[in-house]
Image (cartoon, rainbow, N blue to C red):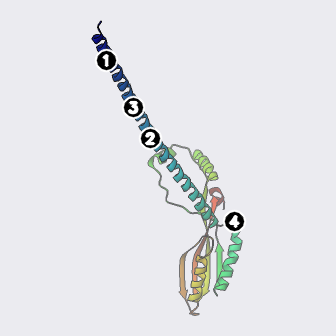
């Protein structure tokens, strides 16, 4: 084998080696690029998940704060006698006379319940005893918002009544006024006013029903 043949063979092997190295490099580069893209994708997904977790934690914190503020605006059982005394003091300060005040039992503040046809069908197949037992079990666990109506009758001139209701509106705990009726009589400008005052508390359904 002459030198020219050997040189050609060596050159061919070198070119094949270079081609093989280039092919391996291209393949490895593609693998690296794919791996980098996959990493970037997973990194982005992780950042999205972390942001969602942050938002959820923020919502939970806000919910807990709002829940605490809402519960602080509600009445505890031991608050009621003091509140009734406060009403008398507020009426006196506004120059309003309370002629009658009757408290009633707490009642659940209901929302509109929409039952599906499937639920109704399933309930029809159960015996009355089963339904009652399941209902009692659910009631024992449920805490609900309840309102205690207080039927009030007061007397005073227009400015005094307005001042009294403004004081109620600014009370630190949640109260509502409804069914307001005002009439004048022989003692005008003294007015007679009837209304329903409601205070709110969290109660167990079973506790409400036994009242």
Disc 1 designates what residue?
11
Q: Nearer the observer, disc 3 or disc 4? A: 3
Crowding around mark 4 (Cα neighbors within 10 Å: few <14, some 14 to 19, many 20+) is few
Q: CA distance from mark 1 to mark 4?
A: 100 Å
- Sequence-wise, which precedes: disc 2 or disc 3? 3
Q: Secondary structure at mark 1?
A: helix
* Along the line of sight, the residue nearer the viewer: 65 or 80: 65
Label 3 or label 1, whichever comes before in sequence order: 1
Q: Quadrant of the rendered structure where residue 130 is?
A: top right
In the image, what residue occupies the spot 34% across and 19% down?
Answer: 14
Q: Position of residue 194 (x, y in %)?
A: 58, 80
**What is the CA distance from the residue labelled 2 to the residue labelled 1?**
42 Å
Marks 4 and 2, the one that precedes in the sequence: 2
Whether tag 2 and tag 3 are in contact, CB under 8 A, the answer is no
Q: From the viewer's perspective, is residue 176 above or below residue 14? A: below
Q: Which of 112/59 is in front?
A: 59
Which residue is outermost to the front? 3
The image quadrant that residue 40 belongs to is top left
Q: Earlier in the sequence, mark 2 or mark 1?
A: 1
* First along the sequence among labels 1 and 4: 1
Q: Is residue 29 above or below residue 142?
A: above
Task: For marks 3 and 1, give the one nearer the viewer.
Answer: 1
Question: In whole angstroms, how far apart are the C-alphas of marks 3 and 4?
Answer: 74 Å
Using a 10 Å C-alpha cutoff, classify the residue at mark 2 as few (fewer than 14 neighbours), some (14 to 19) or many (20 or more): few
Residue found at x 64% / y 56%: 206
* Residue 136 % position (x, y): 62, 50
Q: Which residue is mark 4?
A: 77
The disc label shown at residue 40, or none: 2
Where does the C terminus fall, quadrant-wise? bottom right
Callout 3–callout 4 Cβ contact below 8 Å: no
- The structure residue drawn at horizontal position 70% and vertical position 77%, both measured from the top left corner, is 85
């Amino acid at each position: 084998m002459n030198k020219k043949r050997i040189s050609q063979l060596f050159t061919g092997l070198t070119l094949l080696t270079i081609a093989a190295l280039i092919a391996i490099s291209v393949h490895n580069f593609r693998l690296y690029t794919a791996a980098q893209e996959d990493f970037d994708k997973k990194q982005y997904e992780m950042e999205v998940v972390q942001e969602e977790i942050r938002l959820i934690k923020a919502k939970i914190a806000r919910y807990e704060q709002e829940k605490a503020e809402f519960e602080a605006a509600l009445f505890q059982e031991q608050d009621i006698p003091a509140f009734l005394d406060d009403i008398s003091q507020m009426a006196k300060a506004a120059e309003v006379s309370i002629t009658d005040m009757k408290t009633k039992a707490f009642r659940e503040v209901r929302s509109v319940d929409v039952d599906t046809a499937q639920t109704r069908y399933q309930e029809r197949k159960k015996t009355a005893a089963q339904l009652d037992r399941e209902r009692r079990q659910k009631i024992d666990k449920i805490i609900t918002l309840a309102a205690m109506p207080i039927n009030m009758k007061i007397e005073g001139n227009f400015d005094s009544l307005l001042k009294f209701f403004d004081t109620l509106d600014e009370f630190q705990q949640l109260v509502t006024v409804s069914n307001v009726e005002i009439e004048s009589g022989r003692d005008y400008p003294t007015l007679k006013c009837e209304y329903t005052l409601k205070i709110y508390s969290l109660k167990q359904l079973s506790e409400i029903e036994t009242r």
